[in-house]
Image: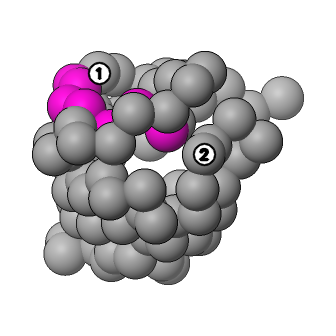
Amino acid sequence: MNESDGPKPPEGSGPQDSGTSVEAGRYVSNRVYVGVKESTTGASQVGVDVDLTKRLKLQAKLGNGTATAQGVTPENDPGSSIGMAYQIEY
């Protein structure tokens, strides 16, 4: 879904969010995507995705952590995280 030849689709709020959020970003190189996310609850977040291989991705997010939401998931967590993702196409 995140191909290095085009922009990453924006994410909206999910059913567990307590407010609306907007995300914008772009690929700064063939394998590095940088984005920012702002929500109406006051949470701000910056994220970096690095495509290590065609299917392996390093993901890092840094947030201000000021907003509190019930039902926090990795997608709407206002804090900071680092992780790896492996994409399988079937």
Please tell me which residue lies in front, 78 or 52: 78
The x and y percentages for residue 81 are: 23, 26
Q: Which residue type carries mark 1?
A: Gly
- Report which residue position mark 1 lands on: 83
Please tell me which residue lies in front, 23 or 70: 70
* Residue found at x 19% / y 75%: 28
Q: Quick check: 13 above or below 5? A: above
Q: Which residue type carries mark 2?
A: Ser
Q: In the image, is residue 79 part of the stretch drawn in magenta?
A: yes
- Report which residue position mark 2 lands on: 18
Give neighbour class at mark 2: few <14, some 14-19, many 20+ (Cα, 10 Å).
some
Give neighbour class at mark 1: few <14, some 14-19, many 20+ (Cα, 10 Å).
few
Where is the C terminus found, in terms of image quarters?
top right
N-terminal of the pair, mark 2 or mark 1, is 2
The x and y percentages for residue 83 are: 29, 21
The answer to whether 12 appears left or right of 37 in the picture is right
Q: How many numbered badges does the structure rendering display?
A: 2
Asked whether residue 30 is in view, the answer is no
Which image quarter: residue 12? bottom right
**Distance Cα–Cα, label 2 vs label 1:** 24 Å
The segment highlighted magenta reads 76-82
